[in-house]
Image: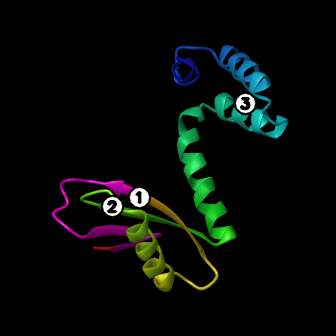
Amino acid sequence: DFKLLVESPGVDPETKVSALEAVCKKAGTEGSVVNFLKVLVENKRIGMLHRVIDLFEVFYRAEKGLVLCKVTSAATLTSGQQTEVKKAMEKRAEKGSTLIMEYATNPAILGGLQVKMGEAVFD
């Protein structure tokens, strides 16, 4: 409901800002974040917030040397298998980088693994 209120073009910007301020105050959000959200509302860009967050994560991870590694398998991997996959991917990763491992299952995969590490895909 809140997302609909904030993203709806039929609601005036003042109402959106008031709602944002109330929610952010209750959540204890920093003033700089609240101001940024207000700018997005006032410039009719609040619908792009999800994209802004995604891009921020990309830049943050790059700055900190964090690499997202998504592993998809036909069946759930055991903890031992997950450890093996992580070790194998660490060998392929750049020196000094830290892998953020995410595991998922997809029964449509006939066998083996699909691994996406950064922009590289291993099948």
Q: Is residue 23 left or right of residue 44?
A: right
Dot in front, 1 or 3: 1
Q: Is residue 30 left or right of residue 94?
A: right
Q: Which numbered disc covers residue 103?
A: 1
Residue at mark 2? 72
Q: Marks 3 and 2, Cα distance to the nearest angstrom?
A: 39 Å
- Outermost residue on the right side: it is 31
> At label 1, which amino acid type do we have?
Tyr
> At label 2, which amino acid type do we have?
Thr
Q: Marks 1 and 2, Cα distance to the nearest angstrom?
A: 6 Å
Residue at mark 3? 38
| First to last magenta residue range | 103-121
Name the residue located 56 percent from the left edge and 17 percent from the top edge.
5
> At label 3, which amino acid type do we have?
Lys
Q: Marks 1 and 3, Cα distance to the nearest angstrom?
A: 36 Å
Q: Position of residue 27 (x, y in %)?
A: 75, 27
